[in-house]
Image: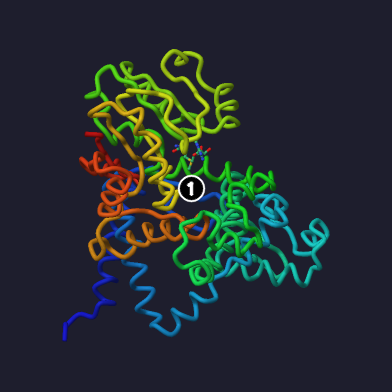
Amino acid sequence: MASTSRLAALAKQIGTQTTKLDKFFAESKLAPPSFEEDAPLMYPFPPDVAEAQEALSAALDELWWLNQGPIQTIVAKSFATSVGLKTILRYNIQNLVPFETGTTYKDLSEKTGVPEKKLTRLLRHGITDHFFRETQPGHIKHTVATKALAVMPVLGTWATMGMYDVGPAKMRMVDAVAKWPESEEPNHSGFQLANDTEKTMFDFFEEHPERMSRFKDAMSFLQTFPGLEPSYAVKAYDWASLGKATVVDVGGSHGNVSIALAKEFPDLKFIVQDLPKVVEDAKTKAPADLSDRVTFQAHDFFKEQPVKDADVYYFRWILHDWSDKYCVKILQALIPALKPGARLLFSERCLEPPCTLPLRAERWNRDSDITMLATSNSQERDEDDWKALLKAADSNFTLEEVRRTPGAKLDMIVAKWK
Ligand SMILES: C[S@@+](CC[C@H](N)C(=O)[O-])C[C@H]1O[C@@H](n2cnc3c(N)ncnc32)[C@H](O)[C@@H]1O
Protein backbone atom coordinates (compact mmCIF):
# COMPACT_ATOMS: atom_id res chain seq x y z
CA MET A 1 0.00 0.00 0.00
CA ALA A 2 1.27 3.50 -0.80
CA SER A 3 2.54 5.34 2.28
CA THR A 4 0.71 8.52 1.23
CA SER A 5 -2.95 8.32 0.30
CA ARG A 6 -4.23 9.79 -2.94
CA LEU A 7 -6.15 12.32 -0.83
CA ALA A 8 -2.93 13.59 0.70
CA ALA A 9 -1.12 13.65 -2.67
CA LEU A 10 -3.95 15.70 -4.16
CA ALA A 11 -3.99 18.06 -1.18
CA LYS A 12 -0.26 18.63 -1.71
CA GLN A 13 -0.84 19.28 -5.41
CA ILE A 14 -3.58 21.75 -4.47
CA GLY A 15 -1.13 23.52 -2.16
CA THR A 16 1.54 23.74 -4.85
CA GLN A 17 -0.78 25.11 -7.53
CA THR A 18 -2.48 27.52 -5.11
CA THR A 19 0.93 28.97 -4.23
CA LYS A 20 1.56 29.70 -7.94
CA LEU A 21 -1.81 31.46 -8.25
CA ASP A 22 -1.25 33.43 -5.05
CA LYS A 23 2.11 34.61 -6.37
CA PHE A 24 0.35 35.88 -9.49
CA PHE A 25 -2.28 37.75 -7.43
CA ALA A 26 0.44 39.33 -5.28
CA GLU A 27 2.65 40.33 -8.23
CA SER A 28 -0.19 41.62 -10.39
CA LYS A 29 -1.77 43.45 -7.43
CA LEU A 30 -5.15 41.96 -8.36
CA ALA A 31 -7.56 41.02 -5.59
CA PRO A 32 -7.65 37.22 -5.18
CA PRO A 33 -10.93 35.40 -5.94
CA SER A 34 -13.71 35.75 -3.40
CA PHE A 35 -17.50 35.76 -3.28
CA GLU A 36 -17.49 39.50 -2.53
CA GLU A 37 -19.61 41.56 -4.88
CA ASP A 38 -16.63 43.62 -6.06
CA ALA A 39 -14.29 40.64 -6.65
CA PRO A 40 -12.79 40.48 -10.16
CA LEU A 41 -14.94 38.65 -12.71
CA MET A 42 -11.93 37.35 -14.63
CA TYR A 43 -8.15 37.35 -14.44
CA PRO A 44 -5.63 37.88 -17.25
CA PHE A 45 -3.64 34.73 -16.47
CA PRO A 46 -0.45 34.23 -18.50
CA PRO A 47 -0.14 30.65 -19.94
CA ASP A 48 1.88 29.18 -17.02
CA VAL A 49 -0.62 30.51 -14.43
CA ALA A 50 -3.56 29.32 -16.55
CA GLU A 51 -1.89 25.88 -16.51
CA ALA A 52 -1.60 26.02 -12.71
CA GLN A 53 -5.28 26.99 -12.48
CA GLU A 54 -6.26 24.02 -14.66
CA ALA A 55 -4.08 21.64 -12.60
CA LEU A 56 -5.69 23.00 -9.44
CA SER A 57 -9.19 22.43 -10.86
CA ALA A 58 -8.28 18.87 -11.88
CA ALA A 59 -6.93 18.08 -8.41
CA LEU A 60 -10.00 19.65 -6.77
CA ASP A 61 -12.34 17.59 -8.98
CA GLU A 62 -10.65 14.37 -8.02
CA LEU A 63 -10.36 15.27 -4.35
CA TRP A 64 -14.03 16.27 -4.25
CA TRP A 65 -14.99 12.87 -5.65
CA LEU A 66 -12.69 10.80 -3.45
CA ASN A 67 -13.59 12.74 -0.33
CA GLN A 68 -17.32 12.23 -0.88
CA GLY A 69 -17.06 8.63 -2.05
CA PRO A 70 -19.19 6.93 -4.70
CA ILE A 71 -22.57 6.96 -2.99
CA GLN A 72 -22.64 10.64 -2.03
CA THR A 73 -21.21 11.57 -5.44
CA ILE A 74 -24.00 9.75 -7.29
CA VAL A 75 -26.62 11.30 -5.03
CA ALA A 76 -25.11 14.78 -5.48
CA LYS A 77 -24.88 14.41 -9.28
CA SER A 78 -28.45 13.21 -9.59
CA PHE A 79 -29.66 16.26 -7.64
CA ALA A 80 -27.44 18.71 -9.52
CA THR A 81 -30.02 21.21 -10.67
CA SER A 82 -29.75 24.97 -10.91
CA VAL A 83 -33.04 25.89 -9.30
CA GLY A 84 -31.60 29.08 -7.82
CA LEU A 85 -30.04 30.21 -11.09
CA LYS A 86 -33.22 29.44 -13.02
CA THR A 87 -35.28 31.43 -10.52
CA ILE A 88 -32.93 34.40 -10.73
CA LEU A 89 -32.94 34.48 -14.53
CA ARG A 90 -36.64 33.72 -14.94
CA TYR A 91 -37.56 36.80 -12.84
CA ASN A 92 -34.52 38.93 -13.70
CA ILE A 93 -33.69 39.09 -9.99
CA GLN A 94 -30.04 39.94 -10.68
CA ASN A 95 -31.31 43.36 -11.77
CA LEU A 96 -33.82 43.79 -8.95
CA VAL A 97 -31.26 43.59 -6.16
CA PRO A 98 -29.34 46.86 -5.72
CA PHE A 99 -25.56 46.53 -5.55
CA GLU A 100 -24.01 46.95 -2.10
CA THR A 101 -27.21 47.47 -0.07
CA GLY A 102 -29.14 44.41 -1.28
CA THR A 103 -32.83 43.93 -0.55
CA THR A 104 -35.41 41.72 1.15
CA TYR A 105 -37.31 38.67 -0.05
CA LYS A 106 -40.45 40.68 0.64
CA ASP A 107 -39.38 43.42 -1.78
CA LEU A 108 -38.47 40.85 -4.44
CA SER A 109 -41.77 39.07 -3.95
CA GLU A 110 -43.64 42.34 -4.60
CA LYS A 111 -41.55 43.08 -7.69
CA THR A 112 -41.77 39.59 -9.23
CA GLY A 113 -45.26 38.57 -8.12
CA VAL A 114 -43.92 35.26 -6.75
CA PRO A 115 -45.34 34.53 -3.26
CA GLU A 116 -42.71 35.45 -0.69
CA LYS A 117 -42.48 32.02 0.95
CA LYS A 118 -41.93 30.21 -2.34
CA LEU A 119 -39.50 32.80 -3.65
CA THR A 120 -37.51 32.61 -0.43
CA ARG A 121 -37.24 28.82 -0.71
CA LEU A 122 -36.15 28.99 -4.36
CA LEU A 123 -33.54 31.66 -3.72
CA ARG A 124 -32.23 29.95 -0.58
CA HIS A 125 -31.44 26.93 -2.72
CA GLY A 126 -29.41 29.18 -5.02
CA ILE A 127 -27.60 30.67 -2.05
CA THR A 128 -26.07 27.23 -1.34
CA ASP A 129 -24.30 27.70 -4.70
CA HIS A 130 -23.25 31.28 -3.81
CA PHE A 131 -25.93 32.83 -6.04
CA PHE A 132 -26.67 35.76 -3.65
CA ARG A 133 -25.95 35.53 0.07
CA GLU A 134 -28.27 36.05 3.00
CA THR A 135 -26.52 38.59 5.22
CA GLN A 136 -29.25 38.59 7.85
CA PRO A 137 -32.48 36.60 7.87
CA GLY A 138 -34.74 37.82 5.09
CA HIS A 139 -32.19 40.16 3.50
CA ILE A 140 -30.00 39.22 0.52
CA LYS A 141 -27.04 40.84 -1.19
CA HIS A 142 -25.14 40.14 -4.37
CA THR A 143 -22.15 37.86 -4.64
CA VAL A 144 -19.67 38.25 -7.45
CA ALA A 145 -21.67 35.61 -9.38
CA THR A 146 -25.04 37.36 -9.31
CA LYS A 147 -23.33 40.67 -9.99
CA ALA A 148 -21.71 39.05 -13.05
CA LEU A 149 -25.22 38.20 -14.31
CA ALA A 150 -26.27 41.83 -13.84
CA VAL A 151 -23.28 43.44 -15.52
CA MET A 152 -22.85 40.84 -18.31
CA PRO A 153 -26.38 40.19 -19.63
CA VAL A 154 -25.07 37.76 -22.25
CA LEU A 155 -23.91 35.47 -19.44
CA GLY A 156 -27.55 35.12 -18.42
CA THR A 157 -28.52 34.53 -22.05
CA TRP A 158 -25.98 31.73 -22.22
CA ALA A 159 -27.21 30.16 -18.97
CA THR A 160 -30.86 30.48 -20.05
CA MET A 161 -30.13 28.70 -23.32
CA GLY A 162 -28.45 25.95 -21.30
CA MET A 163 -31.44 25.57 -19.00
CA TYR A 164 -34.24 25.80 -21.56
CA ASP A 165 -32.72 24.48 -24.80
CA VAL A 166 -29.64 22.32 -24.26
CA GLY A 167 -30.37 20.90 -20.78
CA PRO A 168 -33.83 19.46 -21.58
CA ALA A 169 -32.48 18.02 -24.88
CA LYS A 170 -29.72 16.28 -22.94
CA MET A 171 -32.25 14.92 -20.45
CA ARG A 172 -34.14 13.25 -23.34
CA MET A 173 -31.12 12.26 -25.39
CA VAL A 174 -30.87 8.68 -24.18
CA ASP A 175 -34.58 8.24 -24.93
CA ALA A 176 -33.90 9.53 -28.44
CA VAL A 177 -31.07 7.02 -28.92
CA ALA A 178 -33.45 4.26 -27.78
CA LYS A 179 -36.20 5.49 -30.13
CA TRP A 180 -34.05 6.06 -33.24
CA PRO A 181 -30.92 3.94 -32.65
CA GLU A 182 -29.49 3.97 -36.19
CA SER A 183 -30.82 7.31 -37.39
CA GLU A 184 -28.55 10.00 -38.81
CA GLU A 185 -31.38 12.49 -39.23
CA PRO A 186 -30.95 15.88 -37.52
CA ASN A 187 -34.54 15.77 -36.24
CA HIS A 188 -34.02 12.54 -34.30
CA SER A 189 -32.41 13.86 -31.13
CA GLY A 190 -33.30 14.66 -27.54
CA PHE A 191 -34.31 18.16 -28.68
CA GLN A 192 -37.34 16.83 -30.58
CA LEU A 193 -38.51 14.74 -27.63
CA ALA A 194 -37.98 17.59 -25.17
CA ASN A 195 -39.91 20.05 -27.37
CA ASP A 196 -42.50 17.66 -28.77
CA THR A 197 -41.65 18.58 -32.36
CA GLU A 198 -40.58 16.85 -35.56
CA LYS A 199 -38.63 19.88 -36.73
CA THR A 200 -34.85 20.23 -36.50
CA MET A 201 -33.66 22.57 -33.77
CA PHE A 202 -32.97 25.39 -36.27
CA ASP A 203 -36.31 25.00 -38.06
CA PHE A 204 -38.02 24.99 -34.67
CA PHE A 205 -36.14 28.15 -33.65
CA GLU A 206 -37.29 29.82 -36.90
CA GLU A 207 -40.83 29.51 -35.52
CA HIS A 208 -39.77 30.81 -32.10
CA PRO A 209 -37.85 34.01 -32.82
CA GLU A 210 -37.12 34.70 -29.15
CA ARG A 211 -35.35 31.35 -28.84
CA MET A 212 -33.50 31.89 -32.13
CA SER A 213 -32.33 35.27 -30.93
CA ARG A 214 -31.22 33.80 -27.59
CA PHE A 215 -29.33 31.06 -29.42
CA LYS A 216 -27.57 33.55 -31.69
CA ASP A 217 -26.55 35.77 -28.78
CA ALA A 218 -25.29 32.75 -26.86
CA MET A 219 -23.24 31.62 -29.88
CA SER A 220 -21.67 35.09 -30.18
CA PHE A 221 -20.76 34.88 -26.49
CA LEU A 222 -19.21 31.47 -27.09
CA GLN A 223 -16.86 33.04 -29.64
CA THR A 224 -15.39 35.14 -26.82
CA PHE A 225 -14.48 32.10 -24.67
CA PRO A 226 -10.72 31.75 -24.17
CA GLY A 227 -9.38 29.59 -26.98
CA LEU A 228 -12.34 30.18 -29.30
CA GLU A 229 -11.70 33.78 -30.35
CA PRO A 230 -11.25 34.33 -34.11
CA SER A 231 -7.60 35.21 -33.36
CA TYR A 232 -6.96 31.50 -32.79
CA ALA A 233 -7.91 30.77 -36.39
CA VAL A 234 -5.13 33.17 -37.40
CA LYS A 235 -2.58 31.12 -35.44
CA ALA A 236 -4.02 27.74 -36.37
CA TYR A 237 -2.57 27.52 -39.89
CA ASP A 238 0.32 28.90 -41.92
CA TRP A 239 -1.98 31.15 -43.97
CA ALA A 240 0.96 33.19 -45.31
CA SER A 241 2.30 30.05 -47.03
CA LEU A 242 -0.71 30.18 -49.39
CA GLY A 243 0.66 33.34 -51.04
CA LYS A 244 -1.92 35.11 -53.21
CA ALA A 245 -4.94 32.90 -52.72
CA THR A 246 -8.72 32.73 -52.56
CA VAL A 247 -10.38 31.23 -49.52
CA VAL A 248 -14.06 30.28 -49.54
CA ASP A 249 -15.42 30.44 -45.98
CA VAL A 250 -18.32 27.99 -46.24
CA GLY A 251 -21.04 28.63 -43.65
CA GLY A 252 -18.96 31.60 -42.52
CA SER A 253 -21.86 33.49 -40.97
CA HIS A 254 -20.96 37.19 -40.55
CA GLY A 255 -17.39 36.54 -41.66
CA ASN A 256 -15.77 37.32 -38.30
CA VAL A 257 -13.01 34.81 -38.89
CA SER A 258 -12.44 35.80 -42.54
CA ILE A 259 -12.26 39.44 -41.45
CA ALA A 260 -9.66 38.62 -38.77
CA LEU A 261 -7.64 36.64 -41.33
CA ALA A 262 -7.95 39.33 -44.04
CA LYS A 263 -6.54 41.93 -41.63
CA GLU A 264 -3.49 39.75 -40.98
CA PHE A 265 -2.86 38.40 -44.51
CA PRO A 266 -3.20 41.05 -47.23
CA ASP A 267 -2.58 38.52 -50.05
CA LEU A 268 -5.69 36.53 -49.19
CA LYS A 269 -9.17 37.09 -50.60
CA PHE A 270 -12.23 35.67 -48.86
CA ILE A 271 -15.67 34.74 -50.11
CA VAL A 272 -17.95 34.18 -47.14
CA GLN A 273 -20.91 31.95 -47.93
CA ASP A 274 -24.01 31.40 -45.83
CA LEU A 275 -27.78 31.18 -46.13
CA PRO A 276 -29.45 34.19 -47.86
CA LYS A 277 -30.88 35.78 -44.68
CA VAL A 278 -27.51 35.62 -42.89
CA VAL A 279 -25.64 37.03 -45.89
CA GLU A 280 -28.11 39.88 -46.25
CA ASP A 281 -27.45 40.93 -42.65
CA ALA A 282 -23.70 40.25 -42.82
CA LYS A 283 -23.29 42.57 -45.84
CA THR A 284 -24.66 45.50 -43.86
CA LYS A 285 -22.19 44.93 -41.01
CA ALA A 286 -18.97 44.11 -42.91
CA PRO A 287 -16.06 46.59 -42.62
CA ALA A 288 -15.97 48.86 -45.68
CA ASP A 289 -12.17 48.99 -45.80
CA LEU A 290 -11.99 45.24 -46.52
CA SER A 291 -14.81 45.15 -49.06
CA ASP A 292 -12.43 44.35 -51.95
CA ARG A 293 -11.05 41.28 -50.16
CA VAL A 294 -13.96 40.02 -48.05
CA THR A 295 -17.13 39.48 -50.05
CA PHE A 296 -20.34 37.65 -49.22
CA GLN A 297 -22.36 35.18 -51.24
CA ALA A 298 -25.60 33.34 -50.54
CA HIS A 299 -25.06 29.62 -50.97
CA ASP A 300 -26.59 26.45 -49.54
CA PHE A 301 -23.67 24.14 -48.82
CA PHE A 302 -25.69 21.06 -49.79
CA LYS A 303 -25.82 22.41 -53.37
CA GLU A 304 -22.98 22.44 -55.92
CA GLN A 305 -20.20 24.85 -54.91
CA PRO A 306 -20.38 27.92 -57.22
CA VAL A 307 -16.82 29.20 -56.58
CA LYS A 308 -14.62 27.10 -58.84
CA ASP A 309 -10.87 26.56 -58.44
CA ALA A 310 -10.42 28.33 -55.12
CA ASP A 311 -7.20 27.50 -53.26
CA VAL A 312 -8.94 26.79 -49.94
CA TYR A 313 -12.44 25.83 -48.86
CA TYR A 314 -12.62 26.65 -45.16
CA PHE A 315 -15.24 25.30 -42.77
CA ARG A 316 -15.31 26.56 -39.22
CA TRP A 317 -17.65 24.77 -36.86
CA ILE A 318 -19.82 23.38 -39.62
CA LEU A 319 -19.32 19.63 -39.83
CA HIS A 320 -19.87 18.95 -36.12
CA ASP A 321 -23.45 20.18 -36.69
CA TRP A 322 -24.14 17.25 -39.02
CA SER A 323 -24.07 13.44 -38.95
CA ASP A 324 -21.73 11.65 -41.38
CA LYS A 325 -24.53 11.14 -43.90
CA TYR A 326 -25.00 14.91 -44.29
CA CYS A 327 -21.27 15.76 -44.03
CA VAL A 328 -20.65 13.46 -46.98
CA LYS A 329 -23.23 15.45 -48.98
CA ILE A 330 -21.56 18.75 -47.98
CA LEU A 331 -18.13 17.47 -49.07
CA GLN A 332 -19.40 15.94 -52.30
CA ALA A 333 -21.06 19.24 -53.25
CA LEU A 334 -17.54 20.72 -53.44
CA ILE A 335 -16.11 18.19 -55.86
CA PRO A 336 -17.16 19.81 -59.19
CA ALA A 337 -15.41 23.03 -58.06
CA LEU A 338 -12.12 21.51 -56.89
CA LYS A 339 -8.84 21.94 -58.72
CA PRO A 340 -6.05 19.40 -58.10
CA GLY A 341 -4.28 20.24 -54.82
CA ALA A 342 -7.16 22.35 -53.47
CA ARG A 343 -7.14 22.40 -49.68
CA LEU A 344 -9.99 21.85 -47.28
CA LEU A 345 -9.44 23.35 -43.85
CA PHE A 346 -11.73 22.52 -40.96
CA SER A 347 -11.61 24.49 -37.69
CA GLU A 348 -13.21 21.86 -35.50
CA ARG A 349 -12.39 19.57 -32.63
CA CYS A 350 -10.23 16.60 -33.47
CA LEU A 351 -10.84 14.56 -30.34
CA GLU A 352 -7.75 13.07 -28.75
CA PRO A 353 -7.62 9.24 -28.69
CA PRO A 354 -9.32 7.67 -25.67
CA CYS A 355 -7.31 7.18 -22.47
CA THR A 356 -4.81 9.91 -23.34
CA LEU A 357 -6.27 13.01 -21.67
CA PRO A 358 -6.80 13.81 -17.99
CA LEU A 359 -10.49 13.21 -17.24
CA ARG A 360 -11.20 16.91 -16.75
CA ALA A 361 -9.94 17.75 -20.26
CA GLU A 362 -11.73 14.70 -21.62
CA ARG A 363 -14.97 16.00 -20.07
CA TRP A 364 -14.82 19.18 -22.22
CA ASN A 365 -14.56 16.94 -25.31
CA ARG A 366 -17.34 14.64 -24.15
CA ASP A 367 -19.58 17.58 -23.23
CA SER A 368 -19.20 19.06 -26.72
CA ASP A 369 -19.88 15.69 -28.32
CA ILE A 370 -22.95 14.98 -26.18
CA THR A 371 -24.35 18.48 -26.77
CA MET A 372 -24.16 17.84 -30.52
CA LEU A 373 -25.86 14.43 -30.14
CA ALA A 374 -28.59 15.91 -27.92
CA THR A 375 -29.44 18.88 -30.11
CA SER A 376 -28.77 17.78 -33.73
CA ASN A 377 -27.97 14.04 -33.68
CA SER A 378 -24.51 15.06 -34.84
CA GLN A 379 -21.06 14.62 -33.35
CA GLU A 380 -17.50 15.63 -32.61
CA ARG A 381 -14.88 13.49 -34.38
CA ASP A 382 -11.46 11.99 -33.70
CA GLU A 383 -8.74 11.53 -36.31
CA ASP A 384 -10.03 8.13 -37.44
CA ASP A 385 -13.54 9.59 -37.79
CA TRP A 386 -12.20 12.45 -39.93
CA LYS A 387 -10.28 10.04 -42.16
CA ALA A 388 -13.32 7.78 -42.56
CA LEU A 389 -15.57 10.75 -43.33
CA LEU A 390 -13.27 12.12 -46.05
CA LYS A 391 -12.91 8.66 -47.57
CA ALA A 392 -16.67 8.12 -47.55
CA ALA A 393 -17.10 11.39 -49.49
CA ASP A 394 -14.43 10.51 -52.08
CA SER A 395 -11.17 8.55 -52.08
CA ASN A 396 -9.46 11.61 -53.62
CA PHE A 397 -9.79 13.48 -50.32
CA THR A 398 -6.86 12.83 -48.01
CA LEU A 399 -6.21 13.98 -44.49
CA GLU A 400 -2.85 15.77 -44.51
CA GLU A 401 -2.44 16.82 -40.90
CA VAL A 402 -4.15 17.84 -37.70
CA ARG A 403 -2.71 21.03 -36.24
CA ARG A 404 -3.20 21.72 -32.57
CA THR A 405 -2.55 25.25 -31.28
CA PRO A 406 -1.68 25.62 -27.59
CA GLY A 407 -4.61 27.19 -25.75
CA ALA A 408 -7.02 26.75 -28.70
CA LYS A 409 -10.33 24.99 -28.24
CA LEU A 410 -10.57 24.16 -31.95
CA ASP A 411 -7.97 22.28 -34.00
CA MET A 412 -7.20 22.69 -37.68
CA ILE A 413 -7.86 19.60 -39.77
CA VAL A 414 -6.10 19.94 -43.11
CA ALA A 415 -7.24 17.86 -46.08
CA LYS A 416 -6.32 17.92 -49.75
CA TRP A 417 -8.03 17.07 -53.05
CA LYS A 418 -5.59 14.93 -55.02
C1 LIG B 1 -22.12 26.98 -36.01
S1 LIG B 1 -22.34 28.24 -37.18
C2 LIG B 1 -20.66 28.55 -37.66
C3 LIG B 1 -20.46 29.91 -38.24
C4 LIG B 1 -19.03 30.31 -38.56
N1 LIG B 1 -18.39 29.40 -39.48
C5 LIG B 1 -18.23 30.46 -37.30
O1 LIG B 1 -17.36 29.63 -37.02
O2 LIG B 1 -18.48 31.41 -36.56
C6 LIG B 1 -23.02 27.38 -38.57
C7 LIG B 1 -23.30 28.27 -39.76
O3 LIG B 1 -23.76 27.45 -40.83
C8 LIG B 1 -24.78 28.17 -41.52
N2 LIG B 1 -25.59 27.20 -42.29
C9 LIG B 1 -26.49 26.30 -41.81
N3 LIG B 1 -27.01 25.59 -42.82
C10 LIG B 1 -26.43 26.06 -43.96
C11 LIG B 1 -26.55 25.69 -45.33
N4 LIG B 1 -27.37 24.70 -45.72
N5 LIG B 1 -25.80 26.36 -46.22
C12 LIG B 1 -24.95 27.36 -45.84
N6 LIG B 1 -24.80 27.72 -44.55
C13 LIG B 1 -25.52 27.09 -43.62
C14 LIG B 1 -25.52 28.85 -40.41
O4 LIG B 1 -26.30 29.94 -40.91
C15 LIG B 1 -24.37 29.30 -39.51
O5 LIG B 1 -23.90 30.57 -39.86
- In this rendering, the answer to whether 30 lies above or below 121 is above
Along the line of sight, the residue nearer the viewer: 326 or 189: 326
Q: How many marks?
A: 1
Using residue 323 as the reference point, say whether residue 386 is left or right of it. Answer: left
| Residue at the image point whose x is 40% and y is 24% from the top | 307
Residue to which mark 1 is pinned: 40
Using the rendered view, name the quadrant where residue 139 is placed: bottom right
Using the rendered view, name the quadrant where residue 4 is placed: bottom left
- In this rendering, the answer to whether 281 lies above or below 416 is above
Along the line of sight, the residue nearer the viewer: 336 or 123: 336
Could you tell me which quadrant the N terminus lies in? bottom left
| Residue at the image point whose x is 29% and y is 77% from the top | 7
Query: Could you tell me which secondary element the residue under label 1 belongs to?
Result: loop
- In this rendering, the answer to whether 259 lies above or below 87 is above
Does mark 1's beta carbon lie closer than 8 Å to ligand 1? no
In this view of the protein, can residue 173 be seen by the observer? Answer: yes
Amino acid at pointer 1: Pro
In this view of the protein, can residue 29 be seen by the observer? Answer: no
Along the line of sight, the residue nearer the viewer: 154 or 260: 260
Using residue 155 as the reference point, say whether residue 138 is left or right of it. Answer: right
Residue 417 position within the rendered picture, expressed as x and y whole percent measured from the top left:
25, 34
Using residue 372 as the reference point, say whether residue 37 is left or right of it. Answer: right
Mark 1: give few (<14), some (14-19) or many (20+) Cα within 10 Å: some
Along the line of sight, the residue nearer the viewer: 166 or 182: 182
Could you tell me which quadrant the C terminus lies in? top left
Residue 17 position within the rendered picture, expressed as x and y whole percent measured from the top left:
28, 59
Residue 164 position within the rendered picture, expressed as x and y whole percent measured from the top left:
62, 58
Residue 381 position within the rendered picture, expressed as x and y whole percent measured from the top left:
34, 53
Instruction: Describe the colour scheme in one phrase.
Output: rainbow
